[in-house]
Amino acid sequence: MASSQDRIRPLIAGNWKMHKLPSEATAWLRAFLEDLAATEHGHCDVLLNVPSTHLAPMAALARGTDVMLGAQDVSAHQQGAYTGELSAAMLRDAGARYVVVGHSERRAYHAEDDALVNAKLLRSLEAGLVPILCVGEREDERLAGRAREVVLRQLEGGLQGIEPSGPEALVIAYEPVWAIGTGRTATADDAQEMGAAIRAAVVERFGDTGRALRLLYGGSMKPGNAAELLERDDVNGGLIGGASLDAAQLLAIVEAAR
Ligand code: PGA
């Protein structure tokens, strides 16, 4: 375990995916803010990555609170004739501070490859958004003993030409695909082992900044398994899907990050 002085401040990040209507989201957030105020949470940062239609109304409510907002995807282009796309500057203007990039659902259902993910990271950084780069192997890749190779390749491809201005400017999330939405979680040992491999890669690339980057684990993180995962050195937070839709579960994970 790292000593308390060099412990990286955890980031507890919800990923709502395509759930809730904006009106439901603001009602949810109002109640959540009250509950969060009554919960010890000064030890971590709390972020909700929500559908882009929810950003502006939720950001208005969250202003001046300890909840930050993020988007779940961003265009690889700055602006122009790209029907249906949202630029990083638009998301930032709507209230996002973070954006999830290269989530496995986008890689699988929208054919996003490492080059596209890399372009999205570059546009995010240019616009002052903090990208959360998602990497993670599929089950067949893990069974074939290729998990580490796959993750390091995604990292290498995604981070081409990326220069974070400091450790707050970039987040990496390790999300094994077989653990997402399945109820199956990587063991804390597995999560730490991959976290350590990612740490070594980002230290090699970014030096001291890499040492202090936040590395998240995602994939069926729940109140029951969060504490064990979050106490590991290279698990500096969670990217939480299903459990983040439920305020009580999300708060329990916030508490588990202590
Ligand atoms: P899950 O999703 O927590 O529902 O497994 C995690 C994610 O996809 O980010």
Image: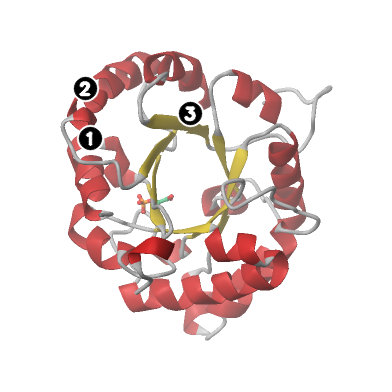
Residue under pointer 1: 247
Residue under pointer 2: 31
For the residues labelled 1 and 3, say whether their Cβ atoms are less than 8 Å apart: no
Q: Secondary structure at mark 1?
A: helix
Residue 7 appears at what percent x and percent y?
40, 62
Residue 198 in the image: above or below residue 54: below
Residue 177 in the image: above or below residue 21: below
Tag of residue 51: 3
Residue 45 appears at what percent x and percent y?
39, 42
Tag of residue 137: none
Decide: few, some or many residues near mark 1? Use Cα within 10 Å; few <14, some 14-19, many ≥20: some
Q: Amino acid at mark 1?
A: Ala
- Seen at 21% across and 22% down, the residue is 31
Answer with mark 3 or mark 2, whichever residue precedes in sequence.
Answer: 2
Q: Is residue 16 left or right of residue 152?
A: left
Decide: few, some or many residues near mark 2? Use Cα within 10 Å; few <14, some 14-19, many ≥20: few
Q: Is residue 37 left or right of residue 148?
A: left
Of labels 3 and 2, the one closer to you: 2
Mark count: 3
Q: Amino acid at mark 3?
A: Pro
Q: Can residue 43 be seen here?
A: yes
Q: Is residue 212 left or right of residue 239?
A: right
For the residues labelled 2 and 1, the Cα–Cα distance comes to 8 Å
Picture quadrant where residue 13 is located: top left
Q: Looking at this view, is 83 or 33 the one in front? A: 33
Q: Can residue 187 be seen here?
A: no
- Seen at 77% across and 46% down, the residue is 119
Answer with mark 1 or mark 3, whichever residue precedes in sequence.
Answer: 3
